[in-house]
Image (cartoon, rainbow, N blue to C red):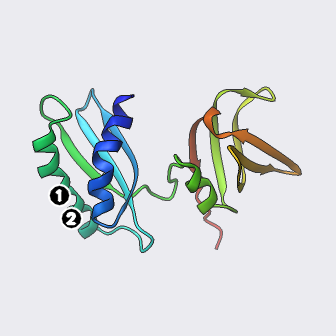
């Protein structure tokens, strides 16, 4: 299990127990920063971040999953939220997403298209008139593309 997956499995129950969704965990070993991205259907406030930070600080001090000192940062995933789980692709149907694949599909590794949801183990995108079925396991990175149209 990769380090970030291990951290997510450790941190997830604490975040979920506080009523938030754990979106992502990132550890920057050069800068010694552990970033935890949380979300809630009502949005995330500074008080939410403080609450999670307080709970996680004590928990991580006891569990000690990262050797040495590091800085803990809690934040919302932002408007360009990462999509990491199959249910994320269902929840954000109709939004524009940017995907990067581990291996080329139809000679492309990068896609920016409208998300139609999931079909079995495939993420379904509409790229112009073309409907694409992309295997979930082939996605390296996926993010929402903010829509600034008013």
Tell me the tag on residue 55.
1
Left or right: 26 as drawn, with respect to 67:
right
- Quarter of the picture containing the N terminus is top left
| Left or right, 60 with reference to 129 | left
> What secondary structure is found at the residue carrying circle 1?
helix
Q: Which mark is residue 104?
A: none
Relative side of 90 to 69, left or right: right
Can you identify the residue that label 2 sits on? 51
**Proximity of marks 1 and 2: CB atoms separated by less than 8 Å:** yes
On screen, 23 above or below 121?
A: below
* Residue found 36% across the figure and 57% down from its top: 38
Q: Rounded to the nearest whole Å, what is the CA distance between mark 1 and mark 2?
A: 6 Å
Question: Based on the displayed image, in which of its 4 quarters is residue 22 positioned?
Answer: bottom left
Q: Residues within 10 Å of mark 2 (few under 14, many from 20)?
A: some
Where residue 86 sits: x, y (%)?
Answer: 58, 50
In the rendered view, would you say 142 is above or below 118?
above
Q: Measuring 28% from the left and 48% from the top, which residue is drawn there?
A: 11
80 or 117, nearer to the observer: 117
Q: Nearer the viewer, residue 116 or 81?
A: 116
Element class at badge 2: helix
Task: Identify the residue at image location x=11%, y=51%.
Answer: 58
Q: Residue at x 77, y 43 (%)?
A: 133
Report crowding for label 1: few under 14, some 14 to 19, many 20 or more residues within 10 A (C-alpha): few
């Amino acid at each position: 299990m990769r380090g970030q997956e291990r951290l997510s499995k450790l941190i997830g129950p604490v975040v979920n127990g506080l009523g938030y969704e754990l979106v992502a965990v990132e550890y920057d070993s050069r800068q010694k920063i552990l970033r935890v991205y949380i979300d809630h259907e009502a949005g995330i406030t500074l008080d939410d971040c403080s609450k999670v930070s307080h709970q996680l600080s004590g928990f991580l001090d006891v569990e000690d999953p990262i050797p040495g000192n590091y800085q803990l940062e809690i934040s919302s995933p932002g408007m360009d939220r990462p999509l990491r789980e199959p249910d994320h692709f269902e929840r954000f149907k109709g939004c524009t997403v940017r995907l990067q694949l581990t291996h080329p599909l139809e000679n492309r590794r990068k896609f920016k298209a409208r998300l139609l949801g999931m079909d079995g183990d495939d993420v379904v995108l509409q790229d112009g008139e073309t409907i694409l079925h992309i295997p979930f396991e082939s996605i390296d990175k996926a993010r929402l593309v903010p829509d600034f149209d008013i």
